[in-house]
Structure formats: C-alpha cells, structure tokens
C-alpha cells in the first residue's frame, strides 16, 4: 500500500506540480483591500492591497497608486482579467478552451485565444531549451504515479503501464496552425498548463497595472511573484524562499531576494510525495523516462524577467538536476537560479547559478 501526501493547486488543482513556497516578506499583504496614504507636495499616493482566489489558489497584489484611483475599480479589473485566463486554461472547466482542445481528435484545428496561444508558445520554448524536461502533456504519467486528482493506486506502476502512458505524452506533437489554431499530431494527448498558468496570470496582472499607469507593484499568485518599482516607503520589494524541509513553517525562510522588475518562482518536492515501503517517491515526473526523478533536488527557485518563464523553468530544473540545470541557466541572460539538493544524510546542499546573490533577511 502507498502512503500519499499531496498539496498545491491552481485552476481547481491545475498546479498540483507546484508548491506555494514564495512568501511575501512585506507586512500586510494578506489584507483584502487596504489603502495607506503618503503625501508628497500636492501628490497623494496610496498603497492598495488586493487579494482573492483564482485558478484554485490565492492571489495578493500591492500597488502604489495615485490618491484618485479607486481600489474597488482596480480590484474589479484584476478579477475580470484573471477570470478570463481561468476560463481559457482551466482543465476542470469542461467549457474552457483547453478542455475543448483536449477533447478534440487528432488533426482537428482548434481555435484558441491570444492568452492560450501565448502560453502554448512559451511552453514550446521551455520544452525545447530543456530537452523535453518540461512537458505540458505529462498528465497521464502524473495520474499513473498517483499524483493526479483521483485516488492513489494500490501499487507502483510496472514498465508496461509506464510505456503505455508515455505513448500519450509529447508536447512536440502539438503545433500551431494558421492564425491562432492548435492541432494534435497524435491521438490521446491533452494539455495541462498548471506549471506555468499561475506565472502567466502574474504577468497578465502586471501588464494590466502598467496599462493603468501604475509603476510600483508586487503581484503574487499561488507563490509565483513579480515586483516592479518600489514600496510606498521607497524600499525595494523583498520576497522570501521557504526552507525546503518537510514540516517547515510557512514563515521559515531559507533566503530572501529583492525584486526590481523581476519575477521569482519556486518549485519543490517536500510537500507532495509518495511513501512506499519506507522509500520516498517525488511528485516530479520526468516526461522523458516516465518516472519520478531521483536526483535529490528538493527545491528550485528561478529569477527572470517574466513569471511565466520563471515558473516553467523552475519545474524543468527539478527534472534536469543541478549539473544540467546550472549549465543551462548560466547560459541564459538575465536569469538566475538556486537549486537545493537533499543529501542522503538529510542535510541540504546549495547550488546557486553564477549571478545568484542572496540578501540578508
């Protein structure tokens, strides 16, 4: 029998492969709507704080706005934008765009929105640069190993079952056709963008705030976060990375980073795993082998210009491991990462990329 522990959701459970491990260091982030005013000359600035639920998880936003801006109106605009993304990419909504695509037969052209197409193309980029370590069609393997929405299986899958599930995996077998259509080249494939949808939501809200001439803000959805400008007191936005230990408190920070027009995303394995006969099996599945990874990586944090890219790359680096992962990141401009490996004795080994610099807590 298998003992199972599972956490982490988005789109009703769409991000089961990601954990809520990035913590807002700024105080007051969990208030519903808070306005704190600062007057400089004739200009009054307010720090508006919004929070709510989206994609099966929570979001928190801090924005420094002019005194004339309505917090309620801003909150409604954010909600409308996030609802549109959820209707596009929720695999738990049978009427969503991605659900319609997943039901489509091989060779059928399925029209999709700019949102879904943007996420698909970013996924294609991450899939190629990581040699297939990230794959949005990995769902059959996730379910097979007991990390899907259903009941955990009684026994670990055998080789035949793994090969059968692998036949239904292959991001490269989906392509864009014409102006805004996706098509499957192989039957049985289905997409689940849970590992990058939250990051895309963060980027979309950041774009919305910029459109409203807001230049100082912090946006977080399900642990993926982007910060631009500075806090109302002029200090930089600071976010913390949770200590990657089973049972660690939410406020137990391992490192802290400052965000200046950057996103931070973290993936980990220490809250979602299977225990079989005293052996721990991670929920992180290698789409290439069809099996849980055994490279010891317990946490990966990625700093990049966009949250969607940081989100997907963090998942891929969990699969790639420290050597291949660091080699990739060190070749990418403007990207940093921190990989943490659990050693056999339970201790932690830290592998930062060349440009990663932690700040004092």
Image: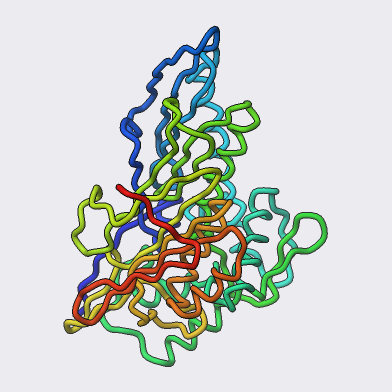
Taking the spot 53% from the left edge, 38% from the top edge, the residue there is: 228
Residue 294 placed where, x, y %?
35, 82
Taking the spot 53% from the left edge, 35% from the top edge, the residue there is: 229
Taking the spot 65% from the left edge, 67% from the top edge, the residue there is: 124
- Tell me the quarter of the image containing the N terminus: bottom left
Taking the spot 75% from the left edge, 58% from the top edge, the residue there is: 181
Residue 75 placed where, x, y %?
49, 26
Most foreground residue, 193 or 154: 193
Q: Is residue 315 above or below residue 35?
A: below
Q: Is residue 68 above or below residue 160?
A: above
Horizontally, residue 218 falls left or right of residue 105, namely left
Q: Residue furthest bottom?
A: 159
**In the figure, residue 161 lies in which quadrant?**
bottom left
Residue 52 placed where, x, y %?
40, 35
Q: Is residue 24 above or below residue 105?
A: above
**In the figure, residue 118 lies in which quadrant?**
bottom right
Most foreground residue, 54 or 312: 312
Horizontally, residue 316 falls left or right of residue 275, namely right
The count of marks equals 0
């Amino acid at each position: 029998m298998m003992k199972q522990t599972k956490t982490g959701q988005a789109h009703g459970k769409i991000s089961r492969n990601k954990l809520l491990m990035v913590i807002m260091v700024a105080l007051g982030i969990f208030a519903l709507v808070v306005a704190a005013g600062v007057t400089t000359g004739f200009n009054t600035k307010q720090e508006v704080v919004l929070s709510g639920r989206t994609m099966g998880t929570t979001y928190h936003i801090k924005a420094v706005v002019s005194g004339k801006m309505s917090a309620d109106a801003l909150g409604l605009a954010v909600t409308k934008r996030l609802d549109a993304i959820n209707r596009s990419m929720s695999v738990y909504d049978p009427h969503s765009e991605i659900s319609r695509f997943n039901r489509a037969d091989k060779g059928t052209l399925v029209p999709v929105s700019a949102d879904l197409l943007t996420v698909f193309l970013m996924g294609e980029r991450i899939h190629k640069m990581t040699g297939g370590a990230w794959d949005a069609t990995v769902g059959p393997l996730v379910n097979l190993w007991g990390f899907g929405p259903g009941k955990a299986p009684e026994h670990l899958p055998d080789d035949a079952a793994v090969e059968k599930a692998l036949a239904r995996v292959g991001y490269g077998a989906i392509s864009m056709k014409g102006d805004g259509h996706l098509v499957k080249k192989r039957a049985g494939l289905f997409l689940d963008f849970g590992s990058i949808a939250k990051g895309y939501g963060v980027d979309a809200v950041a774009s919305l705030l910029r459109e409203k001439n807001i230049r100082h803000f912090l946006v977080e959805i399900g642990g993926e976060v982007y910060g631009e400008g500075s806090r109302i007191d002029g200090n930089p936005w600071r976010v913390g990375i949770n200590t990657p230990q089973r049972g660690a408190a939410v406020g137990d920070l391992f490192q802290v980073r400052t965000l200046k027009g950057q996103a931070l995303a973290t993936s980990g394995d220490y809250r979602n795993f299977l225990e079989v006969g005293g052996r721990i099996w991670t929920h992180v599945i290698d789409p290439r082998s069809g099996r849980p990874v055994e490279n010891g990586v317990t946490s990966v944090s990625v700093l990049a210009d966009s949250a969607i890219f940081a989100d997907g790359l963090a998942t891929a680096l969990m699969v790639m491991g420290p050597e291949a992962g660091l080699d990739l990141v060190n070749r990418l401009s403007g990207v940093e990462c921190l990989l943490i490996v659990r050693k056999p004795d339970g201790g932690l080994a830290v592998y930062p990329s060349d440009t990663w610099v932690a700040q004092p807590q």
